[in-house]
Structures are given as structure tokens and as C-alpha cells.
């Protein structure tokens, strides 16, 4: 196809379909000082300890706030942020963080150990009047495993654990672990989300719900003042509108465009697609309490029946990777031999089914009804049926889908997506497959399998190992164990969010954007 | 004839003259034929991947190319006609039956019953049609039949209103009084006296509303609340194709065009019937 | 049984104002007392809007009314739906406009046989009975399968008469049965009604605006004005020596023998009188005819007159009745 069409011509071509969304964009872009970023939505509430939505809870939060540690997605290990260094006690249960000196919040309040402790206390103290109703931050830090906090001196903050948790440094990089200004908290209480003050590279200048958030570079950011003066986070929910805005130069960075359009956009002058690692894993969860799926050979047959190459080609237009098992290739705990655990082989699937006397087994698969899910549903339905299953897919709106997903009496097969807010190998296992989680109890119901006790033990042992190399080996074995002994999920493919960037901008953290994180402090005008 | 909301939302179509007047009837006839004969004339299975490449361009083997799954687009569009007509015509038929019955009772009985029914209809009509349909689909789940039901429910108030107005116009006429004087009950008055006299204008109006119903159904399918993929559904095909608009615009344009042609042709037919009815 | 066939006591009709629940009404028929004797032809005369059609319909309980109607000894206002339906066949109505009183979607045969079925005639006999009825009103059996639009106005009114007779009624209320018809056929239809009345011994209430016509055919005449019966008495007396000034006005405006001319005069009178007609919304305190009456006194404007016996026979509602000697 002819690719010499210019961005302007392209935008003009497409203008008719998306006028409404592009007209509302003020002329921010292209002055060299402003970066325009596309948001899927914006409520305008940046309360960090409860989930508002990707726009508020992730994209804006990542840009205006920072925690003790930071995951830059280039280095697999967490990096210093508000904490300039830390020490870990020999038994792995006490972490002392040294607060970087001279830092302030956006409201000029100095950052010290007491300020940090104020934020963490708010997560755990249910009597704290500033605490939001559905605060989930405590669970994300470690829940009952967190014994308490302390401030041995003005600039040292201490976290005490009951049992070692090697993932804690990674957990501290989550967007809900950021440090809130105690002055602002004192002043606004429960309304802190509407008057949010933290210490990220940008500070909030103005917020118009469902339209945009305007952010200004912060002089006293620990990494230095960002090169780009202003970030405009503009709500552009429709993929087609994003592509049009990108083509017209009204949008600089987005991670929301459909995979189908990557090649087309890449061919356009002035836009590039930044390749990011495939941190997003897609799995087909099997409810083992459903009679047909209680036989592990039937579950193995499901995994063998999935045509993964067709998923890569027809659903992700080549922008996805063959999976190992649970851990993607970009993370610790992966080994190439895991690919054999997720082999696609229709004949072998059929043979297993015949052996189990389960040819013609009827199964219902629930899927969301938007984004790439319906395409995925069609390919999976087709390939399972080729192997001898009789699969029906139900396409549900997100709310209904989630309700049925977390109810083991309401589904048989279900799609589950897992991205890495921070790439720690434990994040792939304990939140989804540990027996205390609602995912293991309701999505796969695997807690009823006899092998679950050993799985729990192996997860605990792997996470207790602080030597990175030994830890990695344990997770490699964990993948193999779960696939061979349990197979509660079939790995489908691993993918990433395509990140489209204007050639006017460089230094965008594509790996982070490819897995829903937004770190723009190193972005700078090109040339 | 009383105006309905459907009228207010419709553009005024130009009046066709001469032989052109036959055109919309021919188009509708052709589409109905294609819908019925789809299993015979479609070259491929609309659901199966036939081993063709994805998004193949137009060719003699695939007159409309293939879709993002390598399925023959021509066959999918042919097979999508039936559901579109089932939903739009079925929904209107159901809405005429239910709305007609309610409106007939209201218009003939009059009094407090009429007052209550019409206030209820007012409340229903204050909902946007599409929202009412969405609520129904959220409650019932997405399927072609439920889509038909949802569109029907959204149209019921329109027909209740219209029938009530027509019935109230008939019920004051002397033949109704004569029937009552002969000792006939209200049921006989409704079914045997009034109904036959309002059927024609009602059906003429129904034809026009089929176009509205087809559009509503397409919009709901577009929102993913209609047929379950991979069943071919024109509204859903528009949605599926939309993200491909930069690389394969025909994926969204062709099914959209077919919907537009059907809706336009039905509207022209409805207008011609309306003219004859003197509306 | 003896006594009047119909005896009306304080029959009152209120029309609702506007729509909705709890709407107030206006008086369409002021409380009226009236008797219809067996076998008589009682004519009700008045201008349009005088309430004569309302009286006719209320008498058959075709519109909601208050008061009491004794039909052959049975009070029918208080009757339930089922009992009323049984009485219906004994009292029938013929409407003014034969173009709207026949269902345009039904053949003549269907219209008649539905009624015959309703009064319990077995299916096998219906066609023969319907054709017999058609022949009695002067139509051939070929009318049976045809729709009303195939007929002229006069023929349609004959069909409507056949329908009314199909139930075998004792009482027929004919509401201006000829006024919508061509002048050339008016006399035929009136004669048909008189013949049928005589043959079947019917009691008939004949509503008309045409005092000239009814004084030739009626036994008694009632005159209505503004929803009230203002005079009632033997036909001969009313046309010869009217007691109410309004009856006199109707009489004066009647140059016999031309029916058409009489109607024109009456309509002209109604037209010119229109500005003086009292408002239903704001009824006058005294006699409603006072503004148009040459004999009106102060008491006429204050006190509404009640019906009193007139020395020459009948009743009259007037403070200053004419022809009292």
C-alpha cells in the first residue's frame, strides 16, 4: 500500500468520522514545551488508595506522584525514588528506607520519615478519618504480613514484616504506594483525591473531568525538573479518534491504539511505534469445579486446542508473542522450555478428549464485549471446536463480566488478563493463584485441587528467597509444577499495548506504557 | 395522522416521481429475496474461515473481500440481511400488536383508564428509545431475539400513542354508538368495530417505523448488544470493522452501506404509503 | 302491562370539561322529567345545541347520565352491565348521519347478522332474517354482501333502520333521521319509519329541528331550549296555539308546506340568535330564553320557570305563557 500520504492528508481523510473528538483539543501540541497524552477517561479524583479508573488511578497518578521506590522497566529491579537507599535485616523482615534529603511535596511541605509514615498509616488504620471507604492499598502492600511502621530517626522510615517478602520493594513502586503531602491530607481529609498533592515529576495545574488534566513540570523533583514544561492529559477514549489526533499532530503519545493499526501508523511519517516488552499475559481460566473441567486431561486438551498462532495473527495482527506458561519472557521466572507447556496441537487435543470420553463436551466461555476480546473469543471458540469441544462464547459488558468472573457458579471458561504494574515474579503468582485470593477461590476454583497446598508452599518459598538468581530458578520450577500438575489456566499469548509517539518527542518510557504505566519525566523535545 | 416521535426524528425525503417510485419497492424486494435465499446464493459459510487470507481485497472469488478473520465478506453481508429484517420487522410487528392493544383499550374505554395508560406511556416516552432498549438488553442479555424484543419494547409507546389517537377518533363516530346501542360490549367495540377501521393507517405508520427500528437495532448491535459473534450481524460488522478503518475501510463501510440502503428504501416505501393514505 | 313505556325522572347529563381526572362538567341536560306512552310518536324539537340529541342518547343510556329511567317498569340507570345488555335489544336508535353510523369495514350482511347473532338468532336463520329485514326497508337481497360505500345516503339510512329493527325493539329513538339526506328522499324515509311503526306497534321518539315536519307526524311534541324541556303537549295544540314564546318563534319561522324553507329559516334564526345564546360555561340565573324573549320581565331574569300545566293541555315552562285563554 502507498505510504507516502502525509499526516495532515491522512487526518483530513479521516476527519469526517471523528470531528467531535479532535475539535475539542486546544492547540497545545507542537510548541516544544507541551506533551499531549491520550487518556481513556478522567473522573478527576486522584485518591490513590482506591480504584477510580485507568485515567485517574494510573496515568495521572504515575505522572504527578512518586513512592519510596520506582520501577523504570529497563532494569528488572526496583530503583531508588523518594528513598535514596535501603537496608534489609538478615531475616528479611525489616526494611529501613533512608529518605532522600532536601525533597519537598508540590506544596513545599518537606518530605521526611514522619510524612512518609503518615501515608502508610492511612493504609492500615481503619479509624483514620481521611481513609477512603474501599481502601485496598493495605492488601497491595502485603496485607496481614505487614507488622507495622516506624521512624527510627527523622529521615529513616521502617517497614516491619511478619515473614520475608522479596517482592516488597516492587510492591512499593505501585501507583497506590505513592507518598501524599501530610499538609494537604490534614487540610482536605477524605477529599484529598480532589485536591491531590504528592511529589512526582509534574504537579497538577488544572483538571476538567472527562476532558483533560493539565500538569506542570516540578522544579524540586528528585530526578531534576523534567525537560518538557507541560503535560496535557487529554481524554480521547475512541481508538479511531486517537489515531486521527495522532495523525494531525494534536496528540504526542498514546498507548491505546488497536494492534491492527500498528503497521499502518508506523508507515506514516512523523509517528513511530515504540517496541515494548510483552508484559501483558492473556490466559483462559478453567473453573475446575465444573464437572467437564474437573479432569486435568480435559484441561490439557483445552490448552492444546487453542490455536495460538491464529490469536497472534488474527487478534493481535502479529503484535503478540507465544507464551511460556504463567511468567512472560520479559520477566524473571521464565524459561524457554515453558513454551512446550503451552503447545498448540489440535490432533493431540482431540486424542486426549477421545481418551477421556469427552468429545462434544459443551462449555461456555465468558468474554468482555469490547476491545480485542470479541476477536479473541471468536478465535478461541473456533479452535476449541475444531478439537471436538462445543464452545459458546458470551460477550458481556465489563461490569457483568467481572461479576460472573468472580463467581465460580457463574462461569466455566473465562478470559483473564494480567499486566505487570511492576515486573516481580511473585506478582504473577500470589495475587492470582495463592489459596487466600478470591481469584484462586472463584475464577479457577483451584483451591479444591489436592495440589493447591504444595503450590502455596512453593509460592511462599520462592518469595522468601532473596537471592535473585535462586529466586528466579524457583519461579521457573513453579511454572512447570503448576502446568504439569494442575493446569487451572491455559496460557494464550503475551502482548503489549502498542505505544505510538510523535517524532517531535523522544525519551518516552515505552516498556512502562506497554503495560499501563506512565512515566514521562525523561521525555524531551526531539533534536 | 398524528405525528409520532419517529416522524420528528426523520428527515423529509424527496418525493419520487414516475418510474422512480418503483425503485424503493424493488430494492426492498431484492433485499428480502437475498435474505431468504442467502444460504443458497452465498458462496461461502459466513462463520467459517475458508482458508483465505485476512482482509483480502475484492476479487471474483470474494466480491467484497474477506474480513479480519479471513471470512468471505459477501457471504457475511448476505447472511446478515435476515437478522436485520427479523429484528426490525419483528420488533415493529410486536410493537404494533402490544402498543396497538394498549392504545385501543385506552382510546375506546376513555376516562381514568385512558388517563392512567397515557401517563404511563408519557413516562416511557420520556426515556430515549435507545436507552430503554439498552436497559432491556442489559436485563435479558445479548442475542438476536432479545434485540428484537428490546427494539419492540422501545417502540411500544409510539404505537400505543398512535393507536389511542386513531381509536379515540373512531370511537365518537355513530357506528360505534350504534354498536353499543345494539347491546354489544366493549370488547366487540374494540375488536370488531374500531380495530378494522384504524388498521390501515396503523400499518402505514408501521412501515415507516421499520426504518427507525432497523437503525435502532444496528446501533445496539454496534454497541455489542445484538447477535453473538461470529453470527453475522450488520451493525456489529460496522463496529468490528471500525478500528480497521485506516487499513481496510471497506470492512466498516460495506455493511454500513447495506443498512443505509435498507433503511432508506423502507422510508421511501413508507412515504409512498403515507401519501396514499392521505397523511 | 299498562302505564308509560318510558318514564324519566330528573334525568341529568353533565359533560366533562377538558380531560383528565376530576374534571368539572357542564350541564348538557338540565334535570328533566318525561313520559313516553306506549305506541305514541313523541317528537323532540329544538335548535342544534338545545340538548335534544343528548336527551335521546341519555334516554337509551348511551351516555353517562344521572336520575332515573324506567323502561317498561325497569329502572335502567342503576342496571349492571349484563342486565343492561339484555334491555338494549328492546330500545334502539337511528342516527342522523348514515355515512358515519355504519361501520365502513363491514358488509351490510355482517352488520345485520352480528346484531341478529347477539340477540340469539341461530346461525342458520340469520341470513334469511337479514334479507327479510332488508326487504322490509325496501332493499333487495343483493345488498347483503356489499359494503356501505356502495349505497346512497337514503339507502344507508334504510340499512341503519333495518339494523335497529333487527333486535326487535319496543322503542326506537330516531335522531334527526332524515336531516342529512337529500330532500328528495326525506319523505320516503319518514314514510318508511311511519309504516314500520304502525306495522310493528313501535313506540318512537323522533328528534328533529323541524317543527313543521313533526307537527304533521307526531302525537305529542316536546320543545327543548338550552338543555331544558320548555314545553310539551299534543302536536295539534303546539302548532296551533303554542304556549312558550320559543315555540311560537319556531312556529312563526315555519312557512308551510316547504320543509326546506322551514329549515333554512330555523337555521337562520339559530345563526342570528347565536350571539344571544346563553353560555353553557356560565349559565344564566333566570330563564335562559329571556335574552331573546319579547315578553321577558324582571322575574324572568331572576327565577328559572318550572314546567306547569297549560290550560289548553300539556306543560310549559314560562312565567308569561301565551294563549292561556
Image: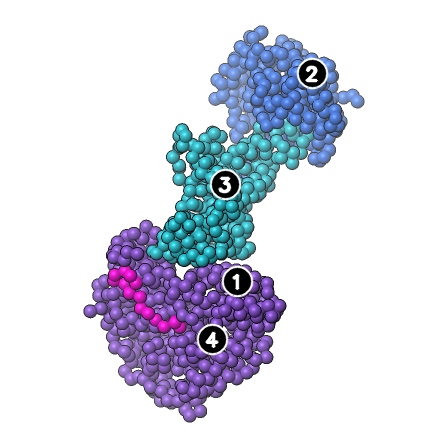
Q: Which mark is residue A340?
A: 4
Q: Chain of mark 1?
A: A
Extreme residue toward the bottom, this view: A90
From this view, report whether residue C185 is shown above or below residue C30: above
Quadrant (top left/top right/bottom left/bottom right) for the C terminus of chain A: bottom left
- Who's the residue at 45% across and 34% down the image? B271
Identify the element where label 3 is drawn. helix
Give the extent of the magenta segment.
A266-279
Q: Is residue C261 visible?
A: yes
From this view, report whether residue B132 is shown above or below residue A391: above
Q: x, y (%) of residue A447? A: 57, 76
How many C-alpha atoms fall within 10 Å of the one at disc 2: few (<14), some, or many (≥20)? some
Q: Chain of mark 4?
A: A
What is the C-alpha distance between the residues marked 4 and 1? 21 Å
Q: x, y (%) of residue C160? A: 64, 21
Of the two numbered discs 3 and 1 in the rendering, the one whose residue sits closer to the viewer: 1
User: Which chain is represented by blue in the image?
Assistant: C
Identify the element where label 1 is drawn. helix
> Are the residues tagged 1 and 2 within 8 Å (C-beta)?
no
The residue at which mark 2 appears reads as C136
Q: Chain of mark 2?
A: C
Of the two numbered discs 2 and 4 in the rendering, the one whose residue sits closer to the viewer: 4
The residue at which mark 3 appears reads as B33
Identify the element where label 4 is drawn. helix
Q: Which mark is residue A386?
A: 1
**Colour seen for chain B:** cyan
Q: Is residue B202 magenta?
A: no
Amino acid at each position: 500500500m502507498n505510504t507516502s500520504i502525509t499526516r495532515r492528508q491522512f487526518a483530513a481523510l479521516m476527519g469526517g468520522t471523528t470531528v467531535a473528538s479532535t475539535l475539542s483539543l486546544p492547540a497545545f501540541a507542537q510548541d516544544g514545551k507541551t506533551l499531549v497524552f491520550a487518556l481513556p477517561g478522567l473522573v478527576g479524583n486522584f485518591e490513590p488508595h482506591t480504584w477510580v479508573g485507568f485515567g485517574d488511578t494510573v496515568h495521572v497518578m504515575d505522572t504527578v506522584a512518586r513512592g519510596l521506590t520506582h520501577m523504570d522497566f529497563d532494569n528488572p529491579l526496583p530503583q531508588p525514588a523518594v528513598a535514596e537507599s535501603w537496608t534489609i535485616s538478615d531475616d528479611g523482615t525489616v526494611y529501613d528506607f533512608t529518605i532522600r534529603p532536601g525533597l519537598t511535596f508540590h506544596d513545599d511541605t518537606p518530605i521526611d520519615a514522619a510524612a512518609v509514615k503518615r501515608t502508610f498509616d492511612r493504609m492500615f488504620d481503619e479509624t483514620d478519618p481521611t481513609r477512603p471507604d474501599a481502601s485496598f492499598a493495605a492488601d497491595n502492600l502485603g496485607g496481614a504480613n505487614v507488622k507495622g511502621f516506624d521512624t527510627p530517626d527523622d529521615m529513616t522510615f521502617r517497614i516491619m514484616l511478619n515473614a520475608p517478602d522479596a517482592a516488597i520493594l516492587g510492591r512499593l513502586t505501585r501507583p497506590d504506594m505513592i507518598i501524599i503531602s501530610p499538609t494537604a491530607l490534614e487540610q482536605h481529609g477524605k477529599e484529598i483525591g480532589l485536591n491531590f498533592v504528592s511529589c512526582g515529576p509534574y504537579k497538577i495545574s488544572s483538571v476538567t473531568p472527562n476532558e483533560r488534566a493539565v500538569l506542570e513540570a516540578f522544579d524540586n523533583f528528585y530526578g531534576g525538573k523534567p525537560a518538557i514544561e507541560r503535560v496535557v492529559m487529554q481524554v480521547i477514549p475512541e481508538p479511531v479518534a486517537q489515531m486521527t489526533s495522532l495523525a494531525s499532530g494534536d496528540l504526542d503519545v498514546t498507548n491505546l491504539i488497536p494492534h491492527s493499526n500498528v503497521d499502518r501508523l508506523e508507515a506514516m511519517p512523523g509517528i513511530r511505534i515504540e517496541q515494548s516488552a510483552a508484559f501483558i499475559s492473556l490466559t483462559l481460566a478453567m473453573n475446575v469445579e465444573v464437572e467437564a473441567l474437573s479432569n486435568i486431561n480435559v484441561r490439557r486438551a483445552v490448552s492444546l486446542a487453542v490455536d495460538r498462532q491464529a490469536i497472534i495473527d488474527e487478534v493481535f495482527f502479529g503484535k503478540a508473542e507465544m507464551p511460556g506458561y504463567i511468567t512472560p519472557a520479559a520477566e524473571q521466572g521464565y524459561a524457554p522450555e515453558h513454551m512446550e507447556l503451552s503447545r498448540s496441537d489440535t490432533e493431540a487435543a482431540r486424542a486426549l478428549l477421545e481418551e477421556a470420553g469427552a468429545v462434544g463436551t459443551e462449555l461456555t466461555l465468558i468474554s468482555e464485549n469490547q476491545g480485542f476480546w470479541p476477536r479473541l473469543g471468536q478465535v478461541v471458540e473456533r479452535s476449541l471446536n475444531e478439537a471436538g469441544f462445543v464452545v459458546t462464547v458470551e460477550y458481556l459488558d465489563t461490569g457483568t463480566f467481572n461479576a460472573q468472573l468472580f463467581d465460580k457458579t457463574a462461569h466455566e471458561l473465562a478470559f483473564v488478563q494480567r499486566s505487570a504494574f511492576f515486573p516481580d515474579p511473585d506478582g504473577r503468582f500470589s495475587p492470582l493463584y495463592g489459596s487466600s485470593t478470591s481469584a484462586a477461590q472463584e475464577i479457577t476454583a483451584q483451591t479444591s485441587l489436592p495440589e493447591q497446598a504444595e503450590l502455596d508452599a512453593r509460592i511462599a518459598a520462592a518469595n522468601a528467597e532473596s537471592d535473585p538468581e535462586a529466586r528466579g530458578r524457583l519461579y521457573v520450577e513453579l511454572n512447570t509444577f503448576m502446568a504439569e500438575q494442575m493446569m487451572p489456566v491455559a496460557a494464550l499469548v503475551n502482548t503489549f499495548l502498542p505505544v505510538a509517539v510523535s517524532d517531535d518527542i523522544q525519551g518516552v518510557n515505552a516498556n512502562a506504557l506497554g503495560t499501563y504505566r506512565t512515566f514521562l519525566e525523561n521525555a524531551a523535545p526531539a533534536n | 395522522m398524528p405525528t409520532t416521535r419517529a416522524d420528528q426524528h426523520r428527515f423529509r425525503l424527496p418525493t419520487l416521481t414516475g418510474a422512480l417510485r418503483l425503485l424503493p419497492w424493488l430494492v426492498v424486494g431484492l433485499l428480502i429475496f437475498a435474505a431468504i435465499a442467502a444460504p443458497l446464493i452465498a458462496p461461502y459459510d459466513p462463520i467459517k474461515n475458508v482458508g483465505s487470507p485476512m482482509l483480502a481485497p475484492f476479487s471474483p472469488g470474494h466480491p467484497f473481500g474477506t474480513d479480519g478473520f479471513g471470512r468471505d465478506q459477501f457471504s457475511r453481508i448476505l447472511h446478515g440481511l435476515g437478522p436485520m429484517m427479523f429484528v426490525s420487522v419483528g420488533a415493529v410487528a410486536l410493537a404494533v400488536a402490544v402498543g396497538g392493544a394498549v392504545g385501543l383499550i385506552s382510546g375506546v374505554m376513555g376516562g381514568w383508564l385512558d388517563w392512567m395508560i397515557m401517563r404511563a406511556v408519557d413516562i416511557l416516552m420520556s426515556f430515549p428509545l435507545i436507552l430503554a432498549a439498552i436497559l432491556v438488553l442489559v436485563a435479558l442479555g445479548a442475542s438476536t431475539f432479545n434485540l428484537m424484543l428490546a427494539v419492540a419494547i422501545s417502540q411500544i409507546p409510539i404505537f400505543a400513542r398512535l393507536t389511542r389517537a386513531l381509536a379515540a377518533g373512531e370511537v365518537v363516530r355513530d357506528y360505534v354508538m350504534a354498536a353499543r346501542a345494539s347491546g354489544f360490549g366493549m370488547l366487540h367495540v374494540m375488536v370488531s368495530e374500531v380495530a378494522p377501521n384504524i388498521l390501515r393507517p396503523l400499518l402505514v405508520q408501521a412501515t415507516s417505523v421499520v426504518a427507525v427500528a432497523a437503525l435502532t437495532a444496528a446501533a445496539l448491535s454496534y454497541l455489542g448488544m445484538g447477535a453473538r459473534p461470529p453470527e453475522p450481524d450488520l451493525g456489529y460488522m460496522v463496529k468490528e470493522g471500525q478500528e480497521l478503518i485506516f487499513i481496510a475501510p471497506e470492512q466498516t463501510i460495506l455493511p454500513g452501506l447495506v443498512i443505509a440502503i435498507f433503511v432508506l428504501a423502507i422510508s421511501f416505501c413508507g412515504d409512498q404509503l403515507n401519501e396514499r393514505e392521505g397523511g | 302491562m299498562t302505564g308509560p313505556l318510558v318514564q324519566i325522572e330528573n334525568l341529568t347529563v353533565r359533560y366533562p370539561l377538558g380531560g383528565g381526572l376530576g374534571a368539572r362538567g357542564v350541564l348538557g341536560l338540565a334535570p328533566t322529567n318525561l313520559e313516553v306512552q306506549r305506541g305514541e310518536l313523541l317528537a323532540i324539537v329544538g335548535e342544534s345545541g338545545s340538548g335534544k340529541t343528548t336527551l335521546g342518547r341519555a334516554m337509551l343510556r348511551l351516555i353517562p347520565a344521572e336520575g332515573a329511567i324506567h323502561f317498561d317498569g325497569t329502572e335502567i340507570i342503576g342496571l349492571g352491565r349484563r342486565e343492561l345488555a339484555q334491555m338494549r335489544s328492546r330500545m334502539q336508535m337511528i342516527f342522523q348521519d348514515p355515512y358515519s353510523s355504519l361501520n365502513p369495514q363491514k358488509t351490510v350482511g355482517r352488520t345485520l347478522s352480528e346484531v341478529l347473532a347477539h340477540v340469539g338468532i341461530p346461525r342458520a336463520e340469520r341470513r334469511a332474517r337479514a334479507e327479510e329485514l332488508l326487504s322490509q326497508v325496501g332493499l333487495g337481497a343483493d345488498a347483503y354482501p356489499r359494503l356501505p360505500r356502495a349505497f346512497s345516503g337514503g339507502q344507508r339510512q334504510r340499512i341503519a333502520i333495518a339494523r335497529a329493527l333487527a333486535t326487535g325493539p319496543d322503542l326506537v329513538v330516531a335522531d334527526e333521521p332524515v336531516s342529512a339526506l337529500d330532500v328528495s328522499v326525506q319523505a320516503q324515509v319518514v314514510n318508511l319509519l311511519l309504516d314500520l311503526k304502525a306495522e310493528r306497534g313501535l313506540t318512537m321518539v323522533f328528534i328533529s329541528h323541524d317543527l313543521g315536519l313533526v307537527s304533521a307526524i307526531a302525537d305529542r311534541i316536546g320543545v327543548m331550549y338550552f338543555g331544558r324541556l320548555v314545553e310539551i303537549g299534543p302536536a295539534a295544540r303546539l302548532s296551533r296555539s303554542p304556549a312558550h314564546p320559543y315555540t311560537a318563534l319556531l312556529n312563526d319561522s315555519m312557512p308551510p308546506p316547504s320543509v326546506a324553507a322551514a329549515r333554512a329559516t330555523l337555521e337562520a334564526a339559530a345563526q342570528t340568535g347565536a350571539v344571544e345564546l346563553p353560555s353553557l360555561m356560565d349559565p344564566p340565573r333566570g330563564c335562559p330564553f329571556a335574552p331573546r324573549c319579547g315578553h321577558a320581565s324582571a322575574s324572568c331574569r331572576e327565577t328559572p320557570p318550572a314546567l306547569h300545566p297549560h290550560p289548553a293541555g300539556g306543560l310549559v315552562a314560562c312565567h308569561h305563557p301565551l294563549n292561556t285563554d
